[in-house]
Image (cartoon, grey):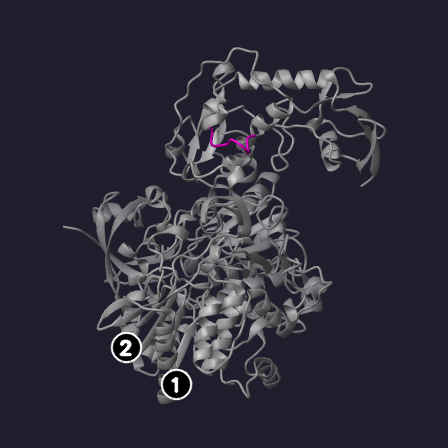
């Protein structure tokens, strides 16, 4: 791969041949907004907000689809560029119900961010009166087409990343809208609820139903961890507010899943806070389970294990570890059985 | 997995056998589907019309438990046509003559009768695999959960060795692990015959190393009991105490009635879990554990990648991390384990375990590392056996003869029941069924029954039927479908209301001790 030098806003920028102007700029910390382009769905060329001026080329160019060339001279913040972006954003704002106050995406909405950055107070265009009822038919996802800016990210995610091939653009002209299958409600469609579309949506058009009203991005702490289900080991962000997991998203930058998740990984988190969780040690007394202190439970267990070991030998005791808990917990379990009990009778469900 | 998840998308030929990938490993299935979109050939061999077949170039619907017959025949055809990798075989393997001898008994004419794939189908599969530059093979429990599970795995390995599809990118023998830390629990030596990193208990030097590190005089040298023998031992009275950490055996072990009888005989059952599950009711003591979101540590995924688990919330009530509970028990039994953090535990593990000793919490802060990773400067290992260097010297063909499942249909129990998972649920339901929304998507267990069979039994879609095996009986709603071929039924173990393991056969692979969850004989009875 050949390195090339181009000039952006008077700065000399080095990049690799074949990369886009957008990527070269972003790698060097130069701000160019995008609403359709996403590093995972790649080039889209839909929203036009990434326009730049290029010396020697007529008109404005969309930087997400423009290959960087040696000695290219690019300007990302001229008055013409900014005015054009403003007009595009104002058109978007007039295209539906972009009401940030009550929107679940407030604080993470990319349309809101670019509106703020461009200093737009409100659209100078009349707001369209389209009024789609929100689609709440999916058990996990709310679709509000009034907030859809037709960036195609969800369609790219559904068809090119998760390859579930449910979402597409339907109808024509001003009636054009994203549809599930043949315009079915999401909950009645072939959607497998992986939530790839929700994670990619730049606005509040697609949101997580269970997270609704549970907290704003600025109130939430994100903790990176590993999904507790299958062996793929997807990396997830747990979104936590007040000691409660309110949402899960995929970590986009790292292996093995690069942001993708399935229905279980993305939406199967609230068992953690189930009221049925065990909270106290339980001891069977006269045929009934009663809550006891840790000291009582542990003393009982340890003394019974010692009694059985003494009476019947360590081989009469067996332990089954857990393919769901950590390496450290499993190591300690294995060590306990071998060193404290004195038997190799330790196994786990890998074989059954 | 011998190879890595990231290779899937660029593999020219993917051969998926006994893996319902879109439902059991959806994110890996995404990579497979992307590969197809890029032009890769996806070959699926599965007794059911699983969702992945929608993207498959070819689907070979072989009979449950006929994998060895199918694959031996494929190898027979590969050798017959000279498609095998002669250079790889002569330089890096041994036992080819024996393999050739064994597979010569599986011409397509014979194999077809056993596996139900047409003779031409077998020849076509052999051609697709044999003439491909590289093939990556993926399997899951469809291969392992048989009385011939070990031989099934060896047969998959034989095929890949025959074609030289090992030791390089876009190839390999790739089991997809079903739980977040099956790989890690094995790596940590939670097995009766090995310590961490598969260091043998039988090896005196290894035992001495661990005994010294653990500050005790000696460690037991005879291999311990595998899970199936544990339950038999409980029934026979040899085993008196079971310490169960995070495993709902009443739902997950085969032949539920047998499992319950065994548990009832125990003098001491310790259940350490996050919920009062179906097994806990047989316990003498129940210890509340912290769950994944309440603990620090590491887990190891299916591609050998050690990744971090981080604490996000406080455990409920007085629930504690497993390592704390176990250490406290050890202390009260007179053996001191005074850990203060999981990182301290991991440091002890990596010092005792050569193949992961280069992995530290600091190094995997951003992204996990794949073992073998023997030292702190090692970048980890994307695929095993690079340059055809095998731990045992030359790779050894281990041919196997096909044997039928332990229980085959007869007049009394005329249907084969096979089991597995669904996308919408997970294992014994302890987590997913306590998460909102999932029971809305898939509210109850369904038994998949073929249209022809349903027709002849007078069963309509949605009817409740009785399913009876030699070990148990249950009531379940019928899903009349062509996902299963005539004579075959499918259920899961997600729902305690109708758990397939009330019916499954506690027959085990003699070497691995894996139960034959994938095949038992049942009778279907219409209600009323």
Q: Residue at left 45%, top 74%?
A: B328
Q: CA distance from mark 2 to mark 1?
A: 17 Å
Mark 1: few, some, or many residues within 10 Å (few <14, many ≥20)? some
Residue A309 tag number: 1
Q: Residue at left 30%, top 62%?
A: B278
Q: Nearer the viewer, mark 2 or mark 1?
A: 1
Establish if B464 lies above or below B115: above
> Closest to the observer: B345 or B387?
B345
Which residues are the magenta region?
A103-109
Residue A108 in the magenta stretch? The answer is yes
Residue A130 in the magenta stretch? The answer is no
Image quarter of the C terminus of chain A: bottom left
Q: Position of residue A238 (x, y in %)?
A: 51, 47
Is A183 on the left or on the right of B128, as rendered? left
Residue B265 tag number: 2
Image quarter of the N terminus of chain A: top right
> Closest to the observer: B60 or B136?
B136
| Secondary structure beneath label 1 | helix
Q: Which is the main secondary structure of the residues drawn in magenta?
A: loop
Is B172 on the left or on the right of B286, as rendered? right
Q: Residue at left 53%, top 72%?
A: B189
Is A66 on the left or on the right of B138, as rendered? right
């Amino acid at each position: 791969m050949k390195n090339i030098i181009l000039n952006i806003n008077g700065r000399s920028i080095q990049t690799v041949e074949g990369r886009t102007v957008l990527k070269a700029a972003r790698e060097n910390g130069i701000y160019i907004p995008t609403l359709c382009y996403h590093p995972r769905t790649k080039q889209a060329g839909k929203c036009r907000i990434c326009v730049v001026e290029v010396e020697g080329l007529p008109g404005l160019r969309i930087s997400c689809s423009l290959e960087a060339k040696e000695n290219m001279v690019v300007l990302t913040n001229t008055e013409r560029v900014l005015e054009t972006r403003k007009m595009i954003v104002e058109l978007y704002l007039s295209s539906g119900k972009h009401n940030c106050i009550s929107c679940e995406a407030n604080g993470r909405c990319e349309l809101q961010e670019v509106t703020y950055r461009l200093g737009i107070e409100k659209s100078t265009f009349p707001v369209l009166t389209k009024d789609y009822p929100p689609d709440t038919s999916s058990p996990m996802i709310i679709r509000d087409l009034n907030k859809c800016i037709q960036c195609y990210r969800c369609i790219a995610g559904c068809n090119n990343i998760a390859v579930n091939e449910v979402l597409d653009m339907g109808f024509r002209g001003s009636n054009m809208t994203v549809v599930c299958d043949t315009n079915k409600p999401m909950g009645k469609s072939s959607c497998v609820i992986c939530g790839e579309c929700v994670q990619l949506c730049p606005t509040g058009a697609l949101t997580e139903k269970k997270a609704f009203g549970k907290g704003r991005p600025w109130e939430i702490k994100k903790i990176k961890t590993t999904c507790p289900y299958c062996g793929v080991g997807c990396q997830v962000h747990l979104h936590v507010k007040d000691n409660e997991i309110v949402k899960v998203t995929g970590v986009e930058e790292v292996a093995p899943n690069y942001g993708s998740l399935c229905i279980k990984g993305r939406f199967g988190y609230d068992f953690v806070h189930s009221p049925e969780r065990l909270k106290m040690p339980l001891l069977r007394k006269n045929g009934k389970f009663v809550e006891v202190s840790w000291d009582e439970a542990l003393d009982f267990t340890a003394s019974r294990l010692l009694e059985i070991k003494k009476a019947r030998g360590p081989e009469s005791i067996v332990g089954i570890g857990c393919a769901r808990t950590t390496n450290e917990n499993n190591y300690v379990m294995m060590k306990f059985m071998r060193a404290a009990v004195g038997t190799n009778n330790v196994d786990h469900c890998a074989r059954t | 997995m011998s190879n890595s998840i990231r290779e899937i998308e660029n593999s020219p030929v993917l051969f998926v056998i006994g893996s319902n990938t879109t439902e059991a490993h959806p994110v890996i299935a995404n990579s497979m589907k992307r590969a197809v979109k890029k032009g890769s050939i996806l070959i699926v061999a599965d007794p059911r019309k699983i969702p992945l077949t929608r993207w498959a170039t070819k689907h070979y619907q072989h009979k449950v438990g006929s994998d060895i017959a199918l694959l031996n025949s494929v190898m027979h055809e590969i050798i017959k046509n000279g498609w095998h990798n002669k250079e790889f075989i002569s330089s890096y393997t041994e036992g080819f003559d024996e393999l050739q001898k064994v597979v010569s008994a599986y011409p397509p004419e014979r194999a077809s009768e056993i596996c139900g794939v047409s003779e031409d189908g077998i020849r076509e599969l052999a051609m697709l695999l044999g003439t491909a530059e590289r093939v990556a093979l993926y399997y899951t429990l469809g291969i392992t959960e048989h009385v011939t599970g070990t031989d099934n795995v060896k047969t998959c390995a034989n095929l890949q060795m025959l074609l030289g599809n090992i030791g390089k990118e876009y190839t390999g023998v790739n089991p997809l692990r079903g739980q977040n830390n099956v790989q890690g629990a094995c790596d940590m030596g939670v097995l009766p015959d090995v310590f961490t990193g598969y260091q043998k208990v039988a090896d005196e030097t290894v035992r001495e190393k661990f005994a010294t590190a653990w500050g005790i005089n000696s460690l037991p040298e005879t291999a311990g009991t595998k899970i199936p023998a544990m339950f038999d031992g409980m029934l026979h009275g040899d085993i008196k105490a079971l310490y169960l950490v995070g495993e709902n055996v009443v739902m997950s072990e085969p032949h539920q009635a047998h499992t319950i009888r065994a548990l009832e005989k125990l003098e001491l059952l310790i259940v350490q879990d996050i919920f009062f599950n179906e097994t806990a009711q047989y316990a003498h003591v129940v210890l509340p554990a912290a769950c994944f979101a309440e603990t620090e540590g590491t887990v190891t995924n299916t591609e050998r990648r050690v990744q971090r688990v981080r604490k996000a919330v406080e455990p409920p009530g007085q629930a504690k991390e497993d390592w704390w509970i176990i250490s406290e028990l050890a202390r009260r039994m007179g053996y001191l384990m005074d850990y203060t953090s999981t990182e301290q535990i991991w440091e002890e593990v990596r010092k005792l375990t050569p193949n992961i000793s280069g992995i530290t919490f600091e190094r995997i802060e951003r992204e996990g590392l794949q073992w073998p990773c023997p030292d702190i400067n090692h970048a980890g290992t994307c695929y095993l056996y690079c340059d055809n260097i095998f731990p045992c010297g030359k790779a050894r063909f281990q041919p196997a003869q096909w044997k039928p499942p332990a229980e085959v249909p007869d007049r009394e129990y005329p249907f084969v029941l096979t089991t597995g998972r669904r996308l919408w649920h997970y294992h014994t339901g302890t987590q997913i069924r306590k998460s909102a929304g999932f029971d809305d998507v898939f509210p109850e267990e369904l038994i998949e029954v073929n249209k022809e069979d349903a027709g002849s039994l007078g069963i309509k879609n949605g009817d409740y039927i009785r399913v009876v095996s030699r070990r148990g009986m249950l009531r379940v709603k019928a899903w009349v479908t062509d996902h299963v071929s005539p004579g075959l039924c499918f259920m899961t173990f997600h729902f305690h209301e109708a758990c397939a393991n009330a019916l499954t056969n506690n027959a085990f692979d003699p070497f691995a001790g894996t139960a034959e969850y994938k095949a038992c004989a049942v009778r279907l009875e219409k209600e009323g």
